[in-house]
Amino acid sequence: MSDDAGPPRTFKGLLRWATTPPQAWGVYLLALLLVWLLSFYAGTLKPKKAPEASPPPVTAPKS
């Protein structure tokens, strides 16, 4: 019998589990999907309207 207690309980154990070959592909694809979704969402946001730039005030020429 083995002492395999199931899923890892620490962050270091989770990191070790996620970097083993079969899971690493899934983690990589999930990260790519997350980056794509975030960039797609950011691209759909409407930019804030900048305040209208008023022309400089007209001054009379000095003679």
Image (spheres, helix red, strand yellow):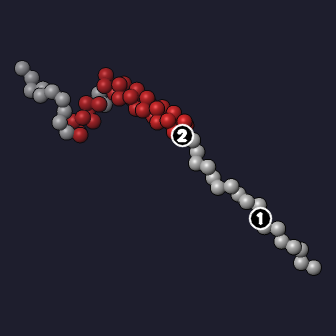
Asked which secondary structure carries label 1, the reply is: loop
In the displayed structure, 61 sits above or below 23; it is below
Q: Which one is in front, 5 or 34?
A: 34
* Count of marks placed on residues: 2
Q: Quadrant of the C terminus?
A: bottom right
11 w.r.t. 24: above or below = below
Which quadrant, please, contains the N terminus?
top left
* Identity, as a three-letter code, of the amino acid under mark 2: Leu
Q: Residue at horizontal 12%, vertical 26%? A: 4
Q: Residue at x 46, y 32 (%)?
A: 37
* Image location of residue 54, percent across then percent down: 73, 60
For marks 1 and 2 on the same chain, the one whose residue lies earlier in the sequence: 2
Residue sitting at the far left: 1
x, y (%) of residue 53?
70, 57
Q: In the picture provided, is 28 more to the left or to the right than 20?
A: right
Q: Residues within 10 Å of mark 2 (few under 14, many from 20)?
A: few
Q: Which residue is mark 2?
A: 45
Cα distance in 3D space between marks 1 and 2: 32 Å
Label 1 close to label 2 by CB (< 8 Å): no
Q: What amino acid is found at the position of numbered circle 1 in the picture?
A: Pro
Left or right: residue 32 compared with residue 27: right
Q: Residue furthest bottom?
A: 63
For the residue pair 56 and 5, the one nearer the viewer reads as 56
The residue beneath circle 1 is: 56
**Left or right: 15, with 1 as reference point:** right
